[in-house]
Image: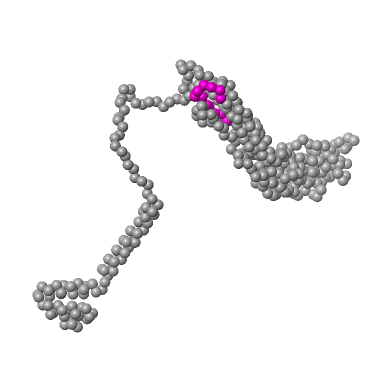
Amino acid sequence: MVRKLLALMLAIAAPPVAGTSPAAPPPGVVTGGFSFPDRPIWAGEVFDLKFAWQVDWDLFRYLDGDLAWTADPLATEGWTRDPQTPPTSTSGKSIARLSFSTRAMALQPGSIRLKPARQQMQIVTGGYEEEGIRIANIGPIAARSAGATLMVRPLPPPPPDFSGAVGDFTLRSTLDGRSGEVGKPIVWTVTLAGTGNWSAFGGVPARQLPRDFDMVGTPGQSEGKSASLFDRSVAERITIVPRRPGAFSLGPVDMTVFDPVTGRYREISAPAIAVDVKRGGAASQPPAYEAEPDLTPPGEVLPPPLSGVGHAWAPLSRRMWHAGLALPFVALGLLWLGLAFDRARRSDPARTARRAHARLLRTIDALGAAPIRRSVAGCSAHGSGMRACC
């Protein structure tokens, strides 16, 4: 009995074999797989996802490092190690279950292939005897699990006022007081809490404010301290100021969500809150908001209004806009034609002869020699050169 106890202590205390890289585990030593609800998951539903290693408890020593797994396209929280359960006997082996838990969500419907998980662990790889005591060698292995296929079904056709929220939510509406006075601010808070796809919708729903109230400033939001990826509590506060006395009702505040448990859309609501507004004293009535200062000097007379009737240009028609856009291109074409005509005139080889002919005709007219002019004009009309006519 003492020898067996000493052997067990040496096996536990024996250091891992140095200089070895993790290898694949021997057959039958470790297997791993995922488990999730045995029904199709709704798109946007938060569900429990589990993973477990099945290890040979006689050879297993301890996990070495964290569970490595790529969650894409799922949105998941971090893995949490479940409490260890006692090993069970299977086919003559003592099998232990090392399980992990998390929560996941799939935003898009369809078939999703879960990638295998990996983790390094230390197991007994062999041993030797020394002085009648069996001493175990411990070495690392790189365990790799099997993958899995998850079916995600689309949501039913939504109602027109569907907010996009999928999960279990509650709405609560509160006031900082059930009574108020005209001109004094009241804080109205609406809180949305629950578990669901918080990243896929706009949070606290919009609310309607009675016409006899003014809202001061912008809404303020705050989250609970225990907020997580899927569990949140968001409170939205607005400051309102009543403008006249009377009995009023704030709310109700409604929101349409999808319940993945029942597979139906349902409406959650924060009941209306009754508030009694009193007239209040004018002297103690604070302003609802700080007015902008009047920079006009005291006693200054305002300028008289402008006289006459003013006129403004009518907006341009579509045809005028098209004509204006085409005008630069038309002007460019006309400029090109003008430059081409000027270049053709300057580079004309008969330009000098025509200019000399025109001067000759003017000289003949000045001398009064009409027969010669007719002869020269005839030569020009028949295309003959001046030398041939002469």
Residue located at (63% from left, 41% from top): 159
Q: Position of residue 258 (x, y in %)?
A: 66, 39
Q: Is residue 290 magenta?
A: no
Provide the residue span drawn in magenta: 233-248
Q: Which corner quadrant of the image does residue 220 belong to?
A: top right
Total labels: the figure holds 0
| Quadrant holding the C terminus | bottom left
Kindly tell me whether residue 55 is visible in this rendering: yes
**Going by the image, does 18 lie left or right of 327?**
right
Q: Is residue 244 magenta?
A: yes
Residue located at (49% from left, 24% from top): 243
Q: Residue furthest left?
A: 367
Q: Position of residue 309 (x, y in %)?
A: 31, 38
* Observer-nearest of 247 and 366: 247
Residue located at (28% from left, 69% from top): 344
| Quadrant holding the N terminus | top right
Q: Position of residue 244 (x, y in %)?
A: 50, 23
Majority secondary structure in the magenta region: strand
Residue located at (51% from left, 24% from top): 242
Q: Residue furthest right?
A: 1
**Going by the image, does 374 lie left or right of 56?**
left
Q: Position of residue 320 (x, y in %)?
A: 37, 52
